[in-house]
Image: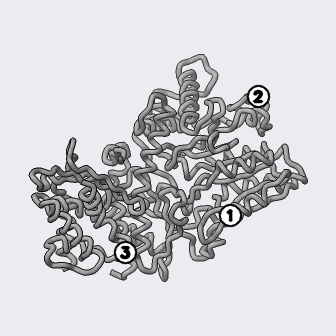
Amino acid sequence: MQSFYKEIVLDHFQRPRNRRGLEEADIEEHIHNPLCGDHVTVYANLRGGTLEEVSFTGRGCSISQASASMLTEQLTGKSRDEAQEKIEAFLEMMRTQENEELGELVALKGIVQARNRLRCATLAWEAMRRALSGL
Amino acid sequence: MQRTFDVQAVREQFPALGREYKGRGVVYFDGPGGSQVAKQAIDAVSGYMERGGANLHGVFPTSTETEEILAQTRLAAADFLGGAPEEVAFGANMTTLTFAISRALAHEWDENSEIVVTELDHRANVDPWLIAASERGATVRWVRVDPETLTLDREDLERNINEHTKLVAVGLASNAVGTVNDVAAIAEKAHGAGAIVAVDAVHAAPHIPIDRDWLGADVITCSAYKFFGPHVGVTAIKRDLFERMSVYRLDPAPDHIPEKLETGTQNHEGIAGVKGALDFIASLGEGASQREKHISAMQTIEEYEADLAAKFRAALGDLPNVKLYAAPEGVHKTPTIAFRVEGRTNEEVCIHMLEHGFFIAAGDFYASTLAEKLGISDGGGFVRAGLAPYNTMEEVERFIEALEGFVKGR
């Protein structure tokens, strides 16, 4: 199972989805974890109440960048409420235990065993949470 | 907002990164021992020799060109360290330069003099001063390093500096554990007592922007082979001090700054290479002047390396049986990471990592007082992973994975 999780994460790291900056986006939130060296900026537009063109830029470890890539797929087409719900569920899982309802995001929980790496996996999600709560 | 740092473009400037070991690309984590050399530096060395070299003071082109290269490198080094070109002198390496400088400065010392050295420093910024002090009958005072925080004990430093202090020798950054010292504050205290401040910037130079006068250094010395150039030492000495320094020199040799310190014919091709290395660094920065470019380049490098080092230290902290030697969060550090693996020798660690393509060294790295103090001298000191701007996050992650396999017996 562990190697299956690892494959999912590596795939997102090596072939990141929606990795691009978005000019004049409704949402643009940069976050940096100096203790771990990861940078992520998340972008999105709000069209008719749903999140569109969710994307990211950044640099850092495979976990931080793969997690941002997964976020863009998971949140595209979601309403603000749905997105916030999903973010909370993901952060809750990372704090506690695997939640099968979250699909491939479980892979992140699966491979992040160490406390110091937790923040790598949650970085993009925290950025989006902050952006959505400020809208 | 993050700055852009194109690590792939940087990597293309280092031919040695194309080397393989047992079929896989080499990862150089031995930068603190000596970095790989930038293409511009290599070309400058070979270009000098191919065009034809000569000694100085001739009327013919190879001689005048050599003088011009020395002058230009002095200017570039002054822009790199902060200072004027005529304050910059070259030598074999930092150790050799420090022996020459210490013998000269010691002419002003006697039995009532005191000097201050630190337990954190590389012995190149300790022993030349100790020997000179011993020859003049001067007293040596050691500043304590706190073995818990791997930082200098500031109270102890304050206690050790007094009106008899002639010299305070301190490193800008520890070559073993990466702690960056607050040299500006130390220099202020030293100058208050009328002492000269000699700063060893060998380990710091490839990692952080340097401004000699902001640091309050009267003498600041580094070595180009740590910052992508060839094996040449460089020092920048404040003019007033440099002019009054009575150096050991040959009678027919120049008696003016900076040449009076440059004993014998210099390593001309190496000095040409230093210019190449400094031009490479400047090319990574932005600004109207070379000085601005150097500072901006070093800020960019520092920021990039800090992210790699943060990941490295955080991940090492998670591994069982790995003891990390690093100053606490919030203390400024270079991306030089010292550790040991419990129950394994340092050599075993280095050999295991070599099998995964990592070139990594172990030892006390001449920071032998620190190693003794930490009780690891007999155990062979530290394993030292030193990052450079040509290293990548992917290499850091692969290192951690390979080390994890080792400590977990996989």
Q: Are marks 2 and 1 in contact (CB under 8 Å)?
A: no
Up-down relation of residue A37 to residue A98 (above or below): above
Up-down relation of residue B240 to residue B310 (above or below): above
Mark 2 — residue? B252
Point out the frontmost of discs 2 and 1: 1
Disc 3 versus disc 1: distance between alpha carbons? 32 Å
Query: Where does residue A46 sit, x and y in percent of width and height?
Result: 15, 51
In this rendering, does residue B23 appear at all?
no
On the picture, is B390 further left or further right than A122?
A: right
Query: Where does residue A54 sit, x and y in percent of width and height?
Result: 17, 54
Do circles 2 and 1 both sit on a common chain?
A: yes
On the picture, is B302 further left or further right than B56?
A: left
- Residue type marked 2: Pro
Colour scheme in use: one colour
Mark 1 — residue? B153
Residue A26, label in figure:
none
At a point 79% along the width and 52% down the height, the residue shown is B132
On the picture, is B136 further left or further right than B350?
A: right
Disc 1 chain ID: B
Query: Where does residue B372 sit, x and y in percent of width and height?
Result: 65, 71
Mark 2: which secondary structure? loop
Disc 3 versus disc 2: distance between alpha carbons? 67 Å
